[in-house]
Amino acid sequence: MAAPTRKKRSTSASKRKPRGNPQKATAARGPATPQKATLGDWIGAARLRTLPLAVTPVLIGTGGALLVDRQLHWVLALACLTVAVALQIGVNFANDYSDGIRGTDDHRVGPARLTASRKAQARTVLIVALAFFAIAALAGIAIVIRTQHWWMLAVGAVCIVAAWFYTGGKRPYGYAGLGELVVFVFFGLVATAGTAFVQVGVVPQEAWLGAVGAGLLACAVLLANNLRDIDQDRVAGKRTLTVRIGKRATQVLFTVFLLVPFAIAALLALVYPIAWLSMLALIPAAAAILIVWTYRLPRELVVALGVTSLTSLAYGAVLMWAFAA
């Protein structure tokens, strides 16, 4: 009689639910296969929040050109806009690829990246980045053919090389704390002056002043981004300017970068009164500064980044209006 009892207990035991955490049991069988990237994921990877930074110098440069020639060269202006936006998107995808294969984005705070999340193959992300660089190159070549300024091919080539080596290559300059300097030069001075030059053949001093403002606002966006990722970048060995100088100095520098452009606008307003309207953009700028100084969670800086980018767009639009009026 004992044997059937033992058999009954054994059968009953086999029907019991397994003990322990079922999630751990699932994890032990291996990680879940990442979902494929959706259209929304690809659009997010283009980092639309940063695109106003590409538009701002084109607006200011076009406004500067209108000071020299009151006729709007809209074809050249649109071509310049295509170059700037395509380069911006291209560098965003290139950063996604380069940081992803290095493991820098494995524990990032902001929106997930395609390469690091493995929603898309690294090769595919690289191809998309190169495609946007190609679009920028073709638009640039069209500008050169139209204007006959053949030496500008070299400028365009340098822009693409700078975009790639921000996080690409064996020794990316973005990992050495030089990101802000290069952003100031290319998304401020080069983009603004280049836009004015291809339209009228000269760069008025007003465009140069506006270029400084555009460059500083672009640097402020980069500072907000790097401040958000300061802990992850420090662990990953990405020595951004923020990692090098620390949180407090970055907050001070962000404030300076955001306010100096409005001092430039006030100077321009002495001659072009409409430029005073750019002071309205101090409202979102002040909000961004407040977030940067009082944030508790790094992801709050994503809002500061977006607000700063929109501040840049408003700044550029008003300066163009002031120059064109």
Image (cartoon, rainbow, N blue to C red):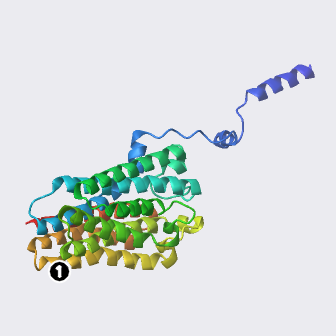
The residue sitting at 58% across, 64% down in the picture is: 236
Q: Which residue is mark 1?
A: 267
Q: Position of residue 165 (x, y in %)?
A: 48, 62
Residue at figure coordinates x 50%, y 38% from the top left: 36
Q: Could you tell me which secondary element the residue under label 1 belongs to? A: helix
Drawn side of residue 97 relative to residue 207, left or right: right
* Residue 300 appears in the rendering: no
* Quadrant occupied by the C terminus: bottom left
Q: Is residue 84 left or right of residue 158?
A: left
224 or 20: nearer the eye? 224
Residue at (41, 59) in percent of width and height: 160
Drawn side of residue 323 relative to residue 290, left or right: left
Residue 19 lies, in percent from the top left, at 72, 39
> Could you say where residue 188 lies in the image, as x and y percent from the top left?
31, 69
Left or right placement of residue 323 versus residue 113 in this view: left
Camera-side residue: 109 or 201? 201
